Amino acid sequence: MMETIIIPLSAAIVAAAIAFFTTRGAVKRTGDKLIKDATVEAENIKQKKILEAKEKFLDLKKEHELYVNERNGKIAQKENTLRQKEGNLNQKINENQIKSKDLDHLKENLAQQLDKAAKKGEEYEKLRKQQIEKLETIAGMTAAEARNTLMDLMREDAKTQAITYINDTIEEAKLTASKEAKRIVVQSIQRVASETAIENSVTVFNIENDDIKGRIIGREGRNIRALEAATGVEIVVDDTPEAIVLSAFDPVRREIARMALHQLVTDGRIHPARIEEVVEKVRTQIEEEIVDAGKKTAIDLGIHNLHPELIRLVGKMKYRSSYGQNLLQHSREVANLCAIMASELGLNAKTAKRAGLLHDIGKVPDDEPELPHAILGMNLAEKYKEKPEICNAIGAHHDETEMTTLIAPIIQVCDAISGARPGARREIVESYIKRLKEMEDLASSHPGVQKTYAIQAGRELRVIVGSEKVSDHEAEKLSFDIAKKIQDEMTYPGQVKITVIRETRAIAYAK
């Protein structure tokens, strides 16, 4: 048996031991309580999470069921569509099978009908040949011969009827057209009031007293010779009181001489150098007046967009004449007549008026080639971009070229109307001017000739030559050659005096 050993303890140790055990019991109780509380809380959290998980699962399940139902609905719809298409396809197959059977039946019927038609066609062809043979036997000619005979008869009959109809129409048109043409022409003439003016080949220059005649003649006639050489105009100073006669076939030359004389007499300084200076200024002034006359004519007639060179040629007509009739006045009259006649006929009046104004521009060119004035005028109009119908009317108004427009015969008729008026023209003047022009051109064809002037109504031809190109001996020979050529090639009344003028000029300037 074990013995109990009692060890005496102090009071402090006992107290400490009591306190230790007391504290350990309290701590244990506290720990148990915390564990219990934690266990309860954990259980609560667990239950809550379980509930949340169940709710989430239910939501996902619901969404899945909706998705599955939707997919099932689409699949069912597609199945219905496929079933419907399958049903339609089966129906079409059945219909096609029925149609195929009907088509085969129709083909058989059609083939039978075609065979019947072919047999009937053969029978008809046999009958037709038999009928033709009977007809040929009765008529005594073949079908081709009968056809040709019938066609010939119909052709002759149609030709006879056509000729009769054409003749009746032509006769009726002649009667109507003749009356209408006379009415239009008379009405056009009545609506255009034109003055009758005849161009002369002389101009009278009036002076204040006869003392001026001596100053114009100058010492030993040098002034009058210088004036005649510069202008190409014969200046006749005779016993006629207070008058000097300027004679030349070219109106431009006469106008230059008249204006130059007027300025010289007014200024008072009359000597060869001054004469040449004034004549040159007057010639420039005349060129400006020519352009102004062309512009004024175009404005008066309402003609626009004329080329500047055509305007200058129109103005140049002011100083030209045709058989004694002023060319510009004649062209204006023709333009107005053409406009009236074109209006009466329902044509373009502006185009007709333009062609009427330009129809004689071939009479006033600068170089004057050897061409009829109608052809030359047509070439000028084409050069300056006029319309083809206007060019043709200009070229055809004397029948030098074929008329291709309705305006061309109007120009021809109006030109004849203007020139055929009583007192409008003089044939003698035109032939006289042509003879003088030919005389000047003949002399100008010789080498060394600078200027030529036919004066004294064609009874004298003055030829100015260059002193550096022609010697005195050659000048004598030149006058003889020109006289012989005129005598051999031209027809003229009386005799023609050829004067060759050769002078030497020395010019210097003091600066």
Image (spheres, grey):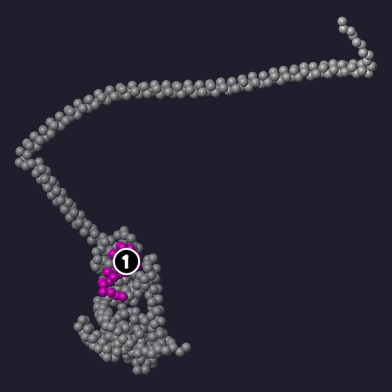
Q: Main secondary structure of the magenta part?
A: helix
For the residue marked with disc 1, what is the amino acid? Answer: Glu
Per the rendered image, the range of residues in magenta is: 367-393
Say if residue 312 shows up in the picture: yes
Say if residue 204 shows up in the picture: no
In the rendered view, does 150 fall on the left or right side of 420?
left
Depth order, front residue of 282/309: 309
Membership of 382 in magenta stretch: yes
In the rendered view, does 150 fall on the left or right side of 469?
left
In the rendered view, does 35 fall on the left or right side of 363?
right
- For image coordinates 42% across by 86% down, the residue present is 266
Residue farthest along the top direction in this orientation: 1
Q: Quadrant of the N terminus?
A: top right
Q: Quadrant of residue 271?
A: bottom left
Bin the neighbour count of mark 1 within 10 Å (Cα to Cα): few under 14, some 14-19, many 20 and up: some
- For image coordinates 44% across by 23% down, the residue present is 81
Name the residue that disc number 1 marks: 382
- For image coordinates 39% across by 87% down, the residue present is 275
Task: State the image coordinates of residue 119 (x, y, percent, origin top left).
Answer: 15, 29
Query: In the picture shown, does residue 42 fall above or below 343?
Result: above
- For image coordinates 13% across by 46% down, the residue present is 151
Query: In the picture shown, does residue 74 fall above or below 229?
Result: above
Task: State the image coordinates of residue 8 (x, y, percent, origin top left).
Answer: 94, 14
Task: State the image coordinates of residue 380 (x, y, percent, origin top left).
Answer: 32, 69
Task: State the image coordinates of residue 185 (x, y, percent, origin top left).
Answer: 27, 64
